[in-house]
Amino acid sequence: MTTKFELVAFTAADVQVVRSWIPHGDALVEWAGTLYSWPLTDAQMLQHYERALPPDAICKPFKYVAASDGSMAGYVELNRIDRHHRNAALSRVIIDPSRRGLGLARPMLDAVLKVAFLELGLHRVELAVYAHNRPALRCYEGMGFVREGCLRELTRVGDSYWDEIRMSLLEHEFGGRFRSIDADATARSR
């Protein structure tokens, strides 16, 4: 039996679960950039979460949960939502460490991209990922995100500096990929 997952709104009650997935300062920077400081606290996350409460908020946090029991398997945000220019940033993507390697990232990201392009009517979704995070880069490129550039040695972590890769996906690129997935599924069902 395959577990089904769904994307639902993140709530303040979920903060401790996500915080438990961040074991040390480097992992915090990997996940959240410089938004938070180590040690990560509920108060830091709740302050950020409160920005997402107004209906016209520029941040929409989501959790990816098992439909059967509501257990959280992932977290992702649409951030810096600009309704006039029709763009946003995909940010703070994380999968529960005990569920990594199970292929959950792509369907979670597909679900949030459907919100971005189909529900919010956005034209462009961008993201930033550290260059050494090869699994994330492979995932994003496999989903059609295009590399736009590298901000060299942008973030200081300990005694080293991390390069940041900027990527984006446009609505017609998502739509084309989405239509080809639907066509493949239709062909398999015949």
Image (cartoon, rainbow, N blue to C red):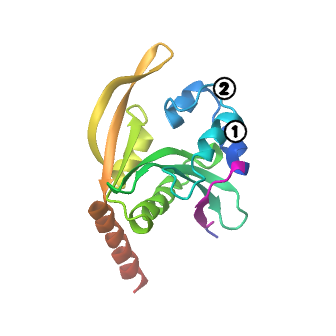
Looking at the rendered structure, the kind of residue marked 1 is Ser
In terms of image quadrants, where is residue 114? bottom left
Q: Which residue is mark 1?
A: 20
Residue 56 in the image: state x and y as whole percent: 51, 56
| Element type where label 1 sits in the image | helix
Where is 156 relative to 21, above or below? above
> Which residue is depicted at the point 70% across and 67% down?
68
Residue 106 in the image: state x and y as whole percent: 46, 56
Looking at the rendered structure, the kind of residue marked 2 is Pro
Is 31 inside the magenta-drawn segment? Answer: no
Q: Which residue is mark 2?
A: 39
Q: Visible in this render: residue 145? A: no
Q: Are marks 2 and 1 in contact (CB under 8 Å)?
A: no
Most foreground residue, 170 or 88: 88
Q: CA distance from mark 2 to mark 1?
A: 11 Å
**Of the image marks 2 and 1, the number of the one nearer the N terminus:** 1
| Element type where label 2 sits in the image | loop
> Which residue is depicted at the point 53% across and 32% down?
35
Residue 72 in the image: state x and y as whole percent: 66, 54
Where is 183 relative to 55, above or below? below
Q: Which residues are magenta?
A: 3-12
Is 9 inside the magenta-drawn segment? Answer: yes
Q: Visible in this render: residue 128? A: yes
Q: Which label number is shown at residue 76? A: none
Q: Are there few (<14), some (14-19), or many (20+) residues within 10 Å of tag 1?
A: few
